Structure formats: C-alpha cells, structure tokens
Image (tube, grey):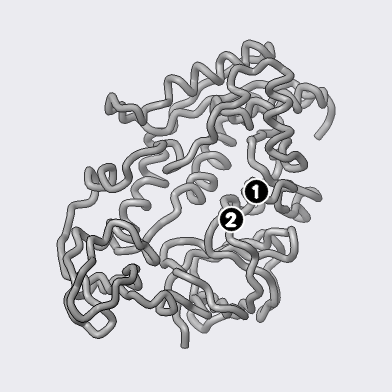
Amino acid sequence: MRPGATIIVGMSGGVDSSVAAWLLLEAGYAVEGLFMKNWEEDDGTEYCTALVDLEDAQRVASRLGITLHTANFAAEYWDDVFDAFLREYRAGRTPNPDILCNREIKFKQFADYARHLGADAIATGHYARLEGCATALRLKKGLDPDKDQSYFLQAVTRPQFENCLFPLGDLLKPAVRAHAKTLGFHNAQKKDSTGICFIGERRFSDFLERYVARDPGHMCDTDGRIVGEHIGLAYYTIGQRQGLGIGGLPGYRERPWYVMRKDKDDNRLIVTQDEGDLASNWLSAGEVNWLVPEAELPLRCHAKVRYRQPDQVATVSARANGTLRVAFDDPQRAVTPGQYVCFYDHDVCLGGAVIESAGSC
C-alpha cells in the first residue's frame, strides 16, 4: 500500500482496533475510523453496550486526531447473518454467526461503505496476516497462538481480502495492551468482547427463546430409552454436559450425561454417558471456500472444527455430490453440524467449509 493512502479502520471501541489505528498512523497512512452498529434492538439490559462502545471508539479517535464515521448495517446484518443464524437453529444445527458476519458485514458492507468514503483500503483488529498480492494473497495465522483469528476469516473470499490490512498480525496481545497503556488509551484494559457477533454477551437460551419457539420432546439414551425431557432441539449442542437435568436414574451409573446427536424427525435428543460416543473420525462438509487456488484432492493437511482447537492431521477428499469428506487421523470430539471446519498448511489458512454430518465408521 502506497505511503499516504487512506485507510479506514473498523473501530469497535476495543483495544485491538484502537491500536490498529495507531499503528497505521505510525506507518504514515491517512487514517480514519468507522464504527458499525449492526443490531438495532435496545432492550434496556446490561447487554446493550453499543453506546458505550461508540463512546470508547470516539475517545480513541479524538486522542489520535482522526475522523470517526458511523454506519448502521442493522438491516444487512439481519438479512445476511441473523436470519441464517435462526434458520440453522430451527433446523437443529448449531451455526457460527461470527464467521458469516466477517464475510457479509465486515468484509462486504463495511468495505463497500469505506470505499464510498474514499478509502484506498480497509483495516481491522483481527489477529491474522496477509501476504502476497492480488490473486496470490495468502491468509496466515496471527503470530499470537492464543489470539489467532484466521479460523473466523475462513469464509471470506479471496477477492474480499484485496486492499485489506491486519496491523496486529505480527503482535502478541500483551504487546497490544502495552501499546495502548503507553498511549494513554482509556480502554487499554477493556475486556475482549465475547458472545454473538455485534449482539454481545447474553444468557443465550433466554435470547434464543425470543426468536425460536420451544418444542419439547424426549431425551433418550443410545438404546432409545427415555431418560428425560428437552425443551427444544435448538437449545442444545453436541457434546453439551450442563443443563440437561438428568441424574439419579435407576439402572444408570452416577456419571455425567452428554448430548450425542439430535433426531429432528422424531424430535428426540440422544444423550449418552460414554464420552467415546462423541468421537468422530470423519465429517462431510459443504459450502466450501478455498482461499488458495483450489487444492488438488485428496489433500493431506491440518484441520480444526472449532476455534482454539489444536490443528489436527486430516485427509480432505471430494465427494460425488460436490461436498468434501474430511477423515481425521485421530478421532475428534463433538463434531457439530452447522459449525465450520478450517483447513491449514502449517500457518497458511487454505479455506474452510460448513460441517454437514459426522461419523465414526
């Protein structure tokens, strides 16, 4: 990127995007910020932090002497992210809206709006790296193994990464906070955001119930015996242990119960006391997004089925219906339909796909 180019940084009010903006100023770019509001609902609870986040972003922008723009993408977020999120839950799957949010909002709506404002490029506070140019761009893991966010960027398409910068990719999180403290940023120790992308930290079952009706049914063991009642398949995820309300049943061991799978046809939640039942050595996946020139299959690589999971050795092959089959060298716990599998060649993110099913045979 040429010196003096205009870079618009997605500023959330957090420490990461704040330091990203400062780093770009130090590098000689003309920097502006953009705060995105993507959730209209203000329910008057402790979970509504948009106004506080905007104030935090404005305070940092003022300290840096840069313009902070604001934009409301709530309609786009609902149509392109949240509606899909609800459809998946109603289908008995467990989606990852953060991944879809990156593709549809941060690297689409935000990028388009930034270009409208005259930006030559955009930047975010993601812990990831981009190397190369144009069609040779490669997405790489951030150098901080505890903060690497390449997993959340796997669904962003290659063209969307053009004219994009990740200033924090070579930094460790403690160094980012140290920069913020030295610069006198009031948010230097602000807690990292968690919860649903742009919606925040909430009691999830209460939030989901506002959009997905309860549909009670039986909890059954692997032999089909009823051991309890569930409130609706959407409210559980594969591998879940807490909140099942099963205990003290005659004829069963005093051991934890886990969600094994969802039987949507009969509205049954299948549970088990054997953690081995949660293991899968293969999965099938669709909606594939390759971030490198489409790999020749079968492909030996590393893969992970959840954020912060250690890389797992796997073989990726094509199926006749256009989906992928991912076979793991070692069984994986609680592989969950609706979530994403991400592929790696060492620190290069090759792309990813949506998990459709999994098994152990």
The three-letter code of the residue at mark 1 reads Asp
**Which residue is rendered at x = 68% and y = 38% of the image?**
173
Q: Is residue 356 left or right of residue 271?
A: right
**Residue 321 on image: x %, y %:** 48, 80
Give whichever of discs 1 and 2 has the lower sequence position. Answer: 1
Q: Is residue 122 left or right of residue 43?
A: right
Residue 146 badge: 1
> Badge 1: how crowded within 10 Å, few (<14), some, or many (20+)?
few
Q: Secondary structure at mark 1?
A: loop
Quadrant occupied by the N terminus: top right
The three-letter code of the residue at mark 2 reads Arg
Up the image or down, 33 lies above or below 340; here it is: above
Pointers 1 and 2 in contact (C-beta within 8 Å) = yes
Q: Is residue 248 left or right of residue 10?
A: left
**Residue 158 on image: x %, y %:** 66, 53
**Residue 191 on image: x %, y %:** 53, 31
Q: Secondary structure at mark 2?
A: loop
Q: Which residue is mark 2?
A: 308
Up the image or down, 274 lies above or below 125; here it is: below
Distance between the alpha carbons at the discs numbered 1 and 2: 7 Å
**Snapshot quadrant of residue 234:** bottom left
Q: Residue furthest right?
A: 3
Q: Nearer the viewer, residue 338 or 69?
A: 338
**Which residue is rendered at x = 68% and y = 29% of the image?**
177
Residue 11 in view:
no
Q: Nearer the viewer, residue 206 or 104?
A: 206
**Which residue is rendered at x = 44% and y = 49% of the image?**
97
Residue 252 in view:
yes
Residue 10 badge: none
> Badge 2: how crowded within 10 Å, few (<14), some, or many (20+)?
few
Q: Nearer the viewer, residue 356 or 215?
A: 215
